[in-house]
Image (spheres, coloured by chain):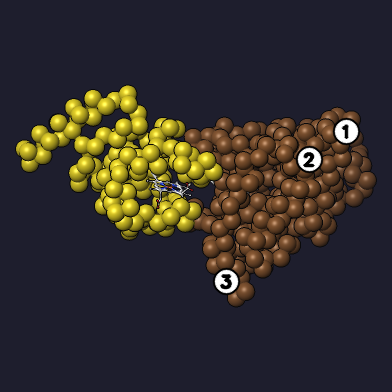
Chain colours: A brown, B yellow
């Protein structure tokens, strides 16, 4: 009921977004960005509380929300969380477990992505999982779908309720953040979109029958069970899918480009609780 | 019937004169047949896919990212202006979300002209 009103407001509230796109990445600091994006989306979707953005499109569209609420009553990802728990508890061939890499605690979601200053790179949770495996003599897992989404689902489930808090500790980290921001706002592909064309400028609107989610909160719910996929997928699988929609050549899951993009996009959601895994259309 | 065919031949030769001048609309392509083809192009997801963003008369499940395309003849008496908007919308609005159909070769000039013939029926 309250949401119905919100959906209408979303379509009417047309706020100029050129301010984000036109600027050079280095023109604004991460703190300024955080405030600007939060302000933008709070204005565009008046009355939607910050935490609600964790639910993607269902935060701002009352029609699709009803169906989604029904799905979340019996979450399709539940068995996969259990499979992930089993992976967590099953020793590698050397006798150790994932716990040995993560201080014995599966609730690691809030610690990723983070800047690794020794290696001068952004480390994401899927990357840390594979590094744990190879360190213990196991083969790395594929990054888009399959077994990695199970262990991610379990770790995400254990992390529910903790808040996103990405930090950008120094100049090198800032450079990676800015690279991610540039990738976000660079027009690409035959259709000449950037990510913000859809998830900032068109958020809450329809592209044919698809409603487009706001960029804010897009990183909290992973891995996601998508009805279209019929299974769980990772955040980078979605990045890749969106780049294909732009008719652009996508980067690879866990490439430096996608990790920088994740660093930028996750920072935007600072203050919003992790709520993965989740279900989407 | 025969007259129409002759008309089309003239249209083709006129069009040929303009090849190379990419921004020049080929004025002579008007006609019901062209409008029908234009409608197909405008609705087809792989081609214009204008319905993704614009409401157009009778179009099923349109998006709402761009304004409804109505009363086009009244609002765009200047065919060139319409052509330019479809060819490269970034020229009028640098932050536009509308793809540059001509510039990025999503639609050929002839296809854009067919779309315009269709738009003029709206």
Of the residues under marks 2 and 3, which one precedes in the sequence? 3
Chain ID, mark 1: A
Q: Residue furthest left?
A: B2
Dots 1 and 2 on the same chain: yes
Asked where in the image residue A94 lies, by quadrant, the reply is top right
User: Are discs 2 and 3 less than 8 Å apart at CB?
Assistant: no
Instruction: Please report the residue visible at 83 percent of the width from the left and 57 percent of the height from the top.
Output: A162
Percent x, y for residue A275?
75, 58
Q: Is residue B79 left or right of residue B6?
A: right
Q: Is residue A77 left or right of residue B118?
A: right
> Can you tell which of label 1 and label 2 is closer to the viewer?
1
| Residue pointed to by mark 3 | A4
Q: CA distance from mark 1 to mark 2?
A: 14 Å
| Residue pointed to by mark 1 | A117
Chain ID, mark 2: A
Category of crowding for the residue at label 1, using alpha-carbon neighbours closer than 10 angstroms: few (below 14), some (14–19), many (at least 20): few
Question: What secondary structure is marked by label 3?
Answer: helix
Instruction: Please report the residue visible at 49 percent of the width from the left and 53 percent of the height from the top.
Output: B65
Q: Nearer the viewer, residue B51 or B81?
A: B81
Q: Nearer the viewer, residue B27 or A272?
A: B27
Q: CA distance from mark 2 to mark 3?
A: 37 Å
User: Are discs 3 and 1 less than 8 Å apart at CB?
Assistant: no
Category of crowding for the residue at label 2, using alpha-carbon neighbours closer than 10 angstroms: few (below 14), some (14–19), many (at least 20): many
| Residue pointed to by mark 2 | A124
Of the residues under marks 3 and 1, which one precedes in the sequence? 3
Question: What secondary structure is marked by label 1?
Answer: loop
Q: Nearer the viewer, residue B50 or A249?
A: B50
């Amino acid at each position: 009921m309250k949401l119905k009103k919100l959906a209408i407001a979303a379509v009417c509230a047309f706020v100029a977004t050129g301010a984000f796109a036109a600027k050079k990445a280095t023109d604004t600091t991460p703190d300024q960005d955080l405030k600007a994006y939060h302000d933008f989306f709070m204005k565009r979707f008046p009355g939607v509380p910050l935490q609600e953005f964790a639910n993607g499109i269902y935060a701002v569209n009352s029609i699709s929300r009803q169906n989604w609420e029904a799905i979340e009553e019996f979450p399709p990802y539940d068995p996969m969380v259990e499979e992930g728990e089993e992976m967590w508890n099953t020793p590698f061939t050397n006798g150790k477990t994932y716990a040995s890499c993560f201080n014995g605690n599966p609730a690691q979601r809030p610690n990723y992505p983070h800047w690794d200053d020794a290696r001068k790179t952004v480390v994401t949770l899927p990357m840390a999982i594979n590094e744990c495996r190879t360190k213990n003599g196991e083969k790395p897992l594929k990054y888009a779908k399959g077994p990695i989404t199970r262990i991610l689902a379990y770790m995400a489930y254990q992390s529910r309720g903790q808040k996103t808090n990405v930090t950008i500790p120094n100049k090198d980290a800032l450079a990676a953040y800015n690279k991610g921001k540039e990738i976000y706002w660079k027009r690409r592909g035959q259709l000449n979109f950037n990510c913000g064309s859809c998830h900032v400028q068109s958020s809450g609107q329809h592209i044919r029958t698809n409603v487009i989610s706001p960029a804010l909160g897009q990183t909290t719910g992973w891995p996601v069970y998508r009805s279209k996929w019929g299974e769980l997928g990772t955040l980078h699988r979605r990045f890749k899918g969106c780049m294909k929609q732009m008719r652009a050549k996508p980067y690879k899951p866990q490439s430096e480009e996608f990790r920088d993009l994740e660093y930028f996009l996750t920072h935007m959601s600072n203050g919003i609780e992790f709520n993965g895994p989740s279900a989407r259309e | 019937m025969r007259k129409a065919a002759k008309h089309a031949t003239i249209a083709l030769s006129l069009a040929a004169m303009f090849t190379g001048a990419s921004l020049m609309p080929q004025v002579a392509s008007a006609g019901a047949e062209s409008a029908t083809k234009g409608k197909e192009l405008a609705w087809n997801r792989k081609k214009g896919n204008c319905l993704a963003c614009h409401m157009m008369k009778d179009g099923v499940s349109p998006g709402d990212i761009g304004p409804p395309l109505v009363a086009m003849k009244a609002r765009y008496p200047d065919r060139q202006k319409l052509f330019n908007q479809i060819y490269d919308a970034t020229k009028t609005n640098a932050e536009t979300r509308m793809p540059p159909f001509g510039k990025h070769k999503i639609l050929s000039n002839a296809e854009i002209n067919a779309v315009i013939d269709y738009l003029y029926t709206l």
